[in-house]
Structures are given as C-alpha cells and as structure tokens.
Amino acid sequence: MRLVDPECAAIAAAFSRRDLRARLPESIAAKDPMYRRSGSSYDLKSIREYQPFDDPRAIDWKLYGRSDRAFVKEFYDEADDEVAFLVDSSASLSCAPVEEYLSFVSSMAFILLSLGMSVRLWTFGSRLSESCVAARSRGAHGSIAGALAAMRFEGRTACSRSFAQWRAGARQRRAFVFSDFHEPNPTFRSSGGLFLIRYRTPFSSLALPGTEAEVRDPETGAVVVAPWSGTDERAWAEAEAARDAALASIPRVFYRRLDPGTPRAPVYWDALERLYA
Amino acid sequence: MPDAIAPVAWLLAPVVALLFVALRLRRRLVYPHELLADRSGARPTALLLRTIRLYYDAALDAACAVVVGLAIAGYPRPAADKGPAVVIDASASMLAGLRGDRPLDEAARLALTRYRLDEPGARRTRLFALGWDPARRRHTLTDRSDVLEAARSPQELAAGLESSESFMSADYALLKGLARRGYGEIRLLTDDASVEGLGVEIVRLPAKPPRYLLLAKAAWDRGSGRSVARFVSAGGAEPDSLWRLGADGAATRAKPEDFEIRRSPSGFELALAIPGAWAVRWDGRLLPFIAPGPPEPLRARGTMAERVVAGLPRLVAGNTGGAAGARPSGGWTGRGVELTDRGGTGRPGSLSVAEARDESWLLPPRLTLGALVASGLDRRADLALGPAAFASAEAATPFWLAWASSAAPDGRAAMAAASRPMRVGDGYLYPGEAVVTPPPGEYAPTGRRVVAAAGSPPERRAVVALALALLYCLKAWLGLRRRRGA
C-alpha cells in the first residue's frame, strides 16, 4: 500500500519556497532563540536584574534572599505548533476506498511534517482512542504510516463526540478530522483551525439504476431494502448535498469532500493555504 | 367476479415468477444507512408504492394480466344502460279496422299510459317504430321518441306515427340492434300472433279476423289478348271499384269496356285490356297492382340457340294476339328472353343452352391425375339438351315459361328508376310502374313462427382495448424515461 502520494514532496517544497517570513510557523521561529518571544512557558530564557518596568510579581524571591538583589526570570513563549489528526476508524469507512482514505491522511501528515510541523494522530470510532501517535519531523512519518496501516475499521461513527473529547483535553490549536461523517447531524464547535475532510463512496456507484438492493449497515448490521430509481437517486443526492452544506457552513471550518478518484493535490494546497492564512 | 379468479391467476403466474426472480437476483450491498434510512418506508403503503415504482414493468404486466383475465372471464359485463325501449310494430296489419279501434290505437294508448316512465330519476322510455322505408325499400327501426314526447293523447301519438311511418311491413330481426345499442328492457307492441320474444317482452294487441283482398297472380293471357289478374278474398271482402293509375299516381275510374270481372271459387278474376298500373278498392281500402303486358318474342344468339328458336315457331313469331296496340303509352318496360349458346348461367333475361351430345363423358386425365371421373353436363349452360330432350314434346316447356315470365315488368329496372315513390292505398307506386304492396302476412296469419330476439348487449371490448392500450403506452413511456436516465 502506497501511503504517501508522489506529489506530496513537491507540494511541500513548493509551499516552503513561498515568502513566509510574516507568517512563519512558530515552531520554525523557535529553533533560533533570537526569534523566540518571551512568554509563560517553563522554558527558561534568561535571568536579569529587576528593572522598574518589570512586573514586581516576576521577581525571583529565592535569588533575592540569597543575593539581596532583585532578579527576574524570563521564560520563552509557548511554541506548540502541533497539528492534531483525528482519523475515523469506524466500520462505515470500510465502504469507502480505504487505501485512498489512508493514503490521503498519510500524505497530509507527510506534507505537514515536511513543512516543520509536528503531527499527533488519534483514531476514533464510537469514542476517541486513548492512545495517540506523534511525529515531530519528516523522518518520524513512519510512525504515522504505521499507525494508519495497523488501523482496523470497526465500531460506529461518533465524530462529534470524539471531537468534543479531543477538544476537552487537547493542547493543539489546529486539527484535521478525517471521516465520512455518517452520523445524524454532526456538530463541531471551532474557534478556528479546524479542517474537516470527508471521504465517502457515492451510493450511485454501487447500486444499479432501476433496481433495489439489500443494504446492510456495516456499523449496526441492520438490513434495509433500498430502491434506486431516478427519484431515489435524486433524493439521495439532495440529502448528500444537505450534509455537505451543513458541514461547510460551520464557522471557521475548512471543509472538503473527496470522492474516490478525485485529484487530491488541490485539496492539499488549499488546506495548506488555509493553515497558513 | 369469482369466475375471473382462475384466468387472472393463470395469467398472473408468469408475472409473479418474473417478479420473484427479480427479487431473488437483487444486489446485496454494504453501505451506511444514515442517508438511506429516511426512505426505507415502514408503512405498507410506502412499501407497495416503492415496489411498484421499482418493478413498474412487472406491475404493468400484472395489470395487463388482470385486464386480459377479466376480459376472458367476460368482464366488464355487457350492460344495458340506456333504459327501456318500447317498439311499436308499424306494419300494415296495425291499421286494420276502424280508426280508434285499430291495433295501432291500442299500442299508442299503452305506450303513452302504461310504459311511459315520467318519474323523476327514472330513465326515459324511448319509442321506436319497426317499419319500412319506401324510398330505400328496406325495413327500418326508427327512434320516434319525439313523437311520443309531443303527443298528449293516444290519438295524437297514433296520428304522429301514421304520418311518419309507411305501415307496410316489419322485420323483427332489427330488434337485435336495440340491445346492441344498450337498451335493456325492450317491449314490442304488435298484433302479430306468430311472434315469440327472446329477451323481448311481446305485448300482443287484439288482432282482427282476417278480411282481405290479395293479388294471387297477374299474367298476360295469349288467348284473350288481355292481362289477367286473379285475386283471392277472405272474410267476405268484395271489390267496390276499379281504378286506372297514371304515371303520376293519379287514379281514374276504369271504363266498363276496359275490363271484365269474373268470379272464381277463391275470389275473382279481372281481365284488363290495358296493361299497366291499376288499383282495386275494397272496404274503403285501395290495393294497387300491375297488369303485365305481352312478352317480347324469343331472340337467339348462337347456332344452337337459333336452332332452338326455329323449332319453336309460335314463340319466335311472338304470337301476342291482340296486344299489339294495347301497350301503354309510356313506362312499359317488358322485354323478351334471349337464348344464347353456353355461358351466362342465371343471367336475367337470358337462357343459355348447350347440346349434351358435344360434351365429353370423362374429364381430361391431366385434371384428375389419371383417375376416371365422369365429366357431367356443361355447368355453364342453363339447359343442357340431349337427344331425349329433343325428342320430347315437353322440351318447349322451359322456353315457354321463360318467355311467359318475361312479360312481368323488370323490378330491378323500376328500382333503379325509383326516386319518388307515391303512396297509393295500401302500397307504393314507383316510377317505372312497379308496385310494392304489403306482404300477405299483413292481412292474414301465415302460420309461420317468428322469433324476435333481443340480441346481446354491447360487450364493451373497447373498454378492454382502451385499458390495454393505456397500460402499454404507460409502459413504453416509462421505459423511454428510464432509458434516458430519468
């Protein structure tokens, strides 16, 4: 299974050549201490004598006791530029072209790692996985690819609940959610930096027009007889369009739907544009 | 309807089998129900509609099978939906008797009082007259409901019918047309005791005892040189006067020297010096008749025919006695008989002869595949004469009969010329001196049995055909729509 699209390296190289000084990722800037801003992290930057403009609360009172002089400690600012990947592993994804789906996730991770960002990947079905896989450099992409290759599709889709679980304890400010969003009324609350990628197979590519099919739900095991006449196809297309419109209308959310076989390079590029916007 | 179950079931069996196969062969897929569950249709009606929508072809086939099965079982049943019909026999016998006491008067009274439905909601009774059209010389069944609606009394109804109908004769077979047109309850008001109804209610009117004067025979008498008309009479009917009819139908009293009257055991005999149209009056009624003139002499065409005519010198000579100057000035179309050699069998005005001596005894073997088959006589000749026929003195009989009968006026010629028939007494006089009078059965019972059958109501096959056409049009339209990917 090829887990990284061949054009990903070129996309990452092309995107890194752009003038990104004004919006360099903080992680890139953090490699040179000169660019690192002071902040509230636990990473010590310097210790200097107290100046009148300093906040008296920043005085290190232990040093004052030992030296009888007032010193303040400066710390670096928070420099977490990690991107969260929430990958749907519910049983319904088995209906989609799994290889394309995993390849897309892996390629996206590869591009972000190539651009110097770190990626932390969770899987979710009916709930968010307790463990996650992290990669901080392009060389660590193998851990992401391995986690994807080992993924098993089972359980029901609960992307809203899983996202809420992740959001409650996450430190990352940006997240990619890869799913088919096959759940009633999926809801996402985002303050920005949320990317929803929908991967699904159209039912019209499976059912023959003018027939009916016994459709088994991979998550519940229930079987319904689904007619597939012109009327049904139109109704299904309307429901799909409504689902797409609902997801795309969530404020501050980047949403794309991917059908099997559609070109993915524009999606990578659009996502990067949005990521660095 | 239970009788339709079997044919419908037989016809539905292949449709059900096809539907079963289609259901068994439907695809099985794995796909999330989230966007499909809304249309699964838990209600039976939704399931039915969905099935019909998907398997419309089988559904239409099933509908066609039901329609054809019902048609085989006789559905839709023939239905009479036009209400009752009263038919009045408008034949000559209905006018027998004094005015007010005729069968027609009684029929008018019954039609107006007993069988006329005026209740609100009841279907209106239609009145028909079973009569005869003198212009087209054919029996008719005419709707005279307008006369019934306009009549306020039986007398007015009878008078209206008298003015609109010819009262010559009736053909009861025409009643079948009424049932075919959807009339269910059919009543026939007639004085004919020999009529029996089959699906028709016969209302017999009181008939009068037979009293008539009828023409039994009219022929040219060679001996006296006069046209002789023999009449039979019953019930004491006697001729009052004799009238000569002109070409325009005008009647003039016959002069005493123009005729002789002789009594006969069954009636009387009139010997008329002038052939043509005459009328005899009896009991105030006028009976027209044609007195035939002398026939033309025999003519011959062909060797054999000429020999025959030469052997019948008196006929060839046209010994017509004193009739040479008795021919009427106009309109007399009598013609002779022409003898021909072979051919023309059954042709009016022609008698073909053949000599049997010339006939071969056996058919040609090439026609019989070698079998010996007697050839018989020449079928193309009216008379095949052999040696025995020539030796017999009676051989002249058929020629004489043909010649004598040619004296009668040609009815077909008169019919062709008929454009404006004139009512003369009981009959009609047509241009060309043809006379049509009521048949003898209108004056006296003939003893024959007549069945007036109502026939069968319309079978409504058009409904079945229309239903099938609609179903197949729908099927074609849906198939076209599906092919276009709608």
Image (cartoon, coloured by chain):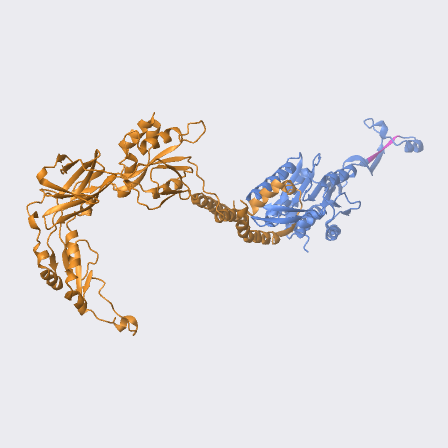
Chain colours: A blue, B orange
Q: Quadrant of residue B397?
A: bottom left
Residue B331, horizontal then vertical, whole percent: 12, 43
Q: Is residue B321 left or right of residue A97?
A: left
Residue B172, horizontal then vertical, whole percent: 34, 42
Q: Is residue A143 visible?
A: yes
Q: Quadrant of residue A277?
A: top right
Q: Is residue A136 left or right of residue B390?
A: right
Q: Is residue B308 left or right of residue A256?
A: left
Foreground residue, B174 or A219?
B174
Q: Is residue A277 visible?
A: no
Instruction: Specify the farthest residue to the bottom.
Output: B370
Instruction: Specify the farthest residue to the right.
Output: A66
Q: Is residue A158 above or below residue B396?
A: above
Instruction: Specify the farthest residue to the front.
Output: B265
Q: Tell me which secondary structure the magenta stretch mostly adopts.
A: strand
Q: Is A71 part of what is drawn in magenta?
A: yes
Foreground residue, B145 or A105?
B145
Residue B17, horizontal then vertical, whole percent: 57, 53
Residue at 17% x, 68% y: name it: B387
Foreground residue, B267 or B254?
B267
Foreground residue, A25 or B433?
B433
Q: Quadrant of residue B353?
A: bottom left
Residue B425, horizontal then vertical, whole percent: 21, 36
| Highlighted magenta segment, given as a residue range | A70-74
Q: Is residue B478 left or right of residue B211?
A: right
Instruction: Specify the farthest residue to the top.
Output: B152
- How many marks the image carries: the answer is 0
Q: Is A143 part of what is drawn in magenta?
A: no
